[in-house]
C-alpha cells in the first residue's frame, strides 16, 4: 500500500481523469434533465448515490417520466444492471481482503472501473487502477448530478428547450458502441419494433420490458473466437 | 419516483455487484450467460430510445422530438463529443417546435 499512488503510470491517471470529466458531463445532464422533466431534485441525487449506474438511472427515470409505474422502472433498471454480475467475478481479486473493502469495492464496480482494471495484469496495479477509478468516478459523478439537479430547477419549461429529445439521445449515445455486433443489433431492432407497436396497447413501462422478446433472435450459438467474447464490452456506459 | 423504488433498484444493483466478490471461489459465470446479459442490456436501451423518441402516452410524440433524436444519433455515430450530441438534439427539437410543428 506504501506506493499505492505511484503504482499507476501517468497515462492511466490521465485517462481516468478524462473519463471522470466525460462522466461528470453525463451526470450533470442526468440531474438537469430529470429535474426539469418534473422529478424532485432528491430523486436523481439519491439514485446516483445508491444505484451509481448511469444507463439504469437514465432508463428508470425515463420510464417514470413517461408515466410508467415505479415497479416497471425498477425492473428495467435491474435488467440493465444484471450485466454487472459478471463484472464482479472478473475483478473479485482486487477487492479481496478485509470485509469492508469487499462491501465498499462492490459499489464501485462500473463499466469504467472494470475496463481500467482489466488493462493491467499485475495485481498491485489492478488494485490501484480499480480503486482510483472507482473512487474518483463516484465523487465526480455524484457531485455533477447535484450541480445538474440544481441547474435543472432553473430550467423551467423542459419541452420548449427540446429537453425531452435529450433523454432518448443520451441513451442512444450510450448504447451505440454495443451495437457493433450484428446479432445484438438485430435483436435490439426487433425489440424496439415490438416496444413501439405495443405502446398504444399496454400500460407505460411494460412495452420496453416486452422488447426483451427480441432476445430470442439473439439466442444464436456463439461462433465468435473466445478472445472477442472476453472483450465484448457490454453497454459501454459513460457513467 | 418513490424512495422505496430507488432503494429497491439500488439494493438489487448492489447484489449483482457483490455476488462476484463473495462467490467467486465457489462458482463461475458461463460465457453464454455473460453474452445474454449484455445483449439484454442493449435490447432494453434501444427499446427505450425508440419509445422515448417516438411516443408520448399511448400515441405519437409528434415530429419535433424524433427529428432531434435523429440529429443527435447521426452526430453520435460520427463520434462527436457528448455535449455536442445532446445539445444539437435538444436544439433541433426546440427549433422545430418554435416553427410550429409539435
Image (cartoon, coloured by chain):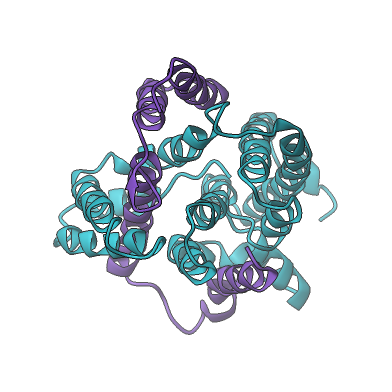
Chain colours: A cyan, B purple
Q: Quadrant of residue A140?
A: top right
In x, y percent, where is residue A83? 44, 62
Residue in view at x 38 percent, y 56 percent: B41
Residue in view at x 56 percent, y 46 percent: A112
The C terminus of chain A lies in quadrant: top right
Q: How many labels, in total?
A: 0
- Given residues A157 and A153, the one toward you in this image is A157
Residue in view at x 77 percent, y 47 percent: A139
Residue lying furthest front:
B100
- Given residues A184 and A99, the one toward you in this image is A184
Residue lying furthest right:
A2
- Given residues A101 and B5, the one toward you in this image is B5
Q: Quadrant of residue A152?
A: top right
Tell me: residue A74, above or below residue A171. below
Tell me: residue A194, above or below residue A19. below
Q: Is residue B64 left or right of residue A45?
A: left
The N terminus of chain A lies in quadrant: bottom right
Tell me: residue A153, above or below residue A231. above
- Given residues A171 and A134, the one toward you in this image is A171
Q: Is residue A11 left or right of residue A68?
A: right
Q: Is residue B59 left or right of residue A104?
A: left
Residue in view at x 64 percent, y 56 percent: A52
In x, y percent, where is residue A65? 53, 52
Amino acid at each position: 500500500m506504501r506506493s499505492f499512488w505511484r503504482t499507476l503510470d501517468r497515462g492511466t491517471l490521465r485517462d481516468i481523469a478524462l473519463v471522470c470529466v466525460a462522466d461528470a458531463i453525463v451526470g450533470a445532464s442526468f440531474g438537469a434533465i430529470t429535474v426539469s422533466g418534473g422529478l424532485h431534485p432528491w430523486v436523481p441525487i439519491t439514485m446516483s448515490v445508491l444505484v451509481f449506474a448511469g444507463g439504469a438511472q437514465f432508463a428508470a427515470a425515463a420510464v417514470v417520466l413517461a408515466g410508467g409505474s415505479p415497479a416497471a422502472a425498477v425492473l428495467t433498471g435491474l435488467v440493465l444492471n444484471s450485466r454487472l454480475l459478471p463484472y464482479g467475478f472478473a475483478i473479485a481479486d482486487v477487492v479481496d481482503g478485509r470485509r469492508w473493502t469487499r462491501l465498499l469495492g462492490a459499489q464501485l464496480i462500473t463499466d469504467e472501473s472494470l475496463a481500467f482494471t482489466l488493462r493491467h495484469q499485475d495485481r498491485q496495479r489492478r488494485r490501484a487502477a480499480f480503486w482510483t477509478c472507482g473512487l474518483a468516478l463516484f465523487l465526480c459523478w455524484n457531485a455533477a448530478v447535484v450541480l445538474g439537479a440544481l441547474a435543472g430547477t432553473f430550467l423551467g419549461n423542459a419541452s420548449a428547450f427540446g429537453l425531452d429529445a435529450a433523454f432518448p439521445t443520451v441513451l442512444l449515445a450510450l448504447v451505440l458502441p454495443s451495437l457493433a455486433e450484428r446479432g445484438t443489433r438485430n435483436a435490439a431492432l426487433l425489440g424496439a419494433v415490438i416496444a413501439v407497436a405495443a405502446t398504444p396497447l399496454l400500460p407505460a413501462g411494460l412495452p420496453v420490458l416486452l422488447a426483451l422478446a427480441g432476445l430470442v433472435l439473439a439466442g444464436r450459438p456463439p461462433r465468435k473466437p473466445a478472445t472477442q467474447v472476453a472483450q465484448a464490452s457490454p453497454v459501454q456506459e459513460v457513467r | 419516483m418513490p424512495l422505496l423504488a430507488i432503494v429497491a433498484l439500488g439494493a438489487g444493483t448492489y447484489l449483482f455487484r457483490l455476488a462476484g466478490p463473495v462467490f467467486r471461489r465457489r462458482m463461475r459465470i458461463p460465457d453464454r450467460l455473460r453474452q445474454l446479459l449484455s445483449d439484454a442490456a442493449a435490447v432494453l436501451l434501444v427499446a427505450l430510445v425508440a419509445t422515448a423518441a417516438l411516443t408520448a402516452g399511448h400515441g405519437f410524440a409528434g415530429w419535433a422530438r424524433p427529428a432531434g433524436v435523429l440529429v443527435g444519433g447521426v452526430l453520435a455515430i460520427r463520434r462527436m463529443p457528448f455535449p455536442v450530441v445532446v445539445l444539437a438534439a435538444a436544439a433541433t427539437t426546440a427549433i422545430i417546435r418554435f416553427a410550429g410543428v409539435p
